[in-house]
Amino acid sequence: MIKKGICLLAIACLFSCSSSKNTASKPLYEVLNYNNDGGANIRFYEILTEPNEIKMLMSDKTLKHKIKSEDMEKSNFIILNMGELPEGNYTVEITKVEETATNIILHVKETKPKRLNPNPDGVFVYPYSVVKINSKKPIVIQ
């Protein structure tokens, strides 16, 4: 009788202490890098989906620790480049990301600083941002 009780107690303990996997979900998007200078001199938004394009990002010194090799199969990346602009604090930000059954809709907002005397020094900046989308669905930028 005591042996049965101990066996039942041990079995109950094993089932109640079973390991459970933590399935915390990743956010739909992550801003990997934003810089007010260092982008290209033309305005463009580029969606990177192919492994060879993503490998190019992995070779960048500021991004190489933020992108893993498995991201090539699970994620898309976007480069948001504002082009050549007069010196100032310009931003390109994601205001909202929506996931539908067929695609990812990315809402982007560009802001420009208010200044009274536009570019008195003739200095230009090239703001850009790199965003990781944790999905392989097609991306629509609005």
Image (cartoon, rainbow, N blue to C red):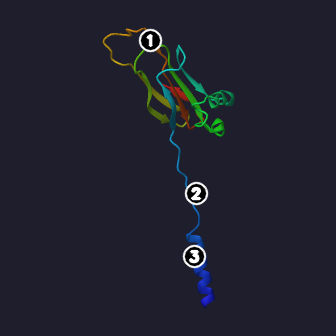
Can you tell which of label 1 and label 2 is closer to the viewer? Answer: 1
Q: Alpha-carbon distance for marks 1 and 2?
A: 53 Å
Earlier along the polypeptide chain: callout 2 or callout 3?
3
Residue, disc 3: 12
Query: How dense is the environment of label 1, judged by Cα within 10 Å: few (below 14), some, or many (20 and up)?
Result: few
- Residue at 43% across, 8% down: 122
Task: Find out whether the residues at labels 1 and 2 contact each other: C-beta distance under 8 Å.
Answer: no
Earlier along the polypeptide chain: callout 1 or callout 2?
2
Residue, disc 2: 21
Q: In which quarter of the image is residue 18?
A: bottom right
- Residue at 53% across, 47% down: 25
- Name the outermost residue toward the left: 116
Residue type highlighted by circle 3: Ala
Residue type highlighted by circle 1: Val
Q: Alpha-carbon distance for marks 1 and 3?
A: 72 Å
Residue, disc 1: 123
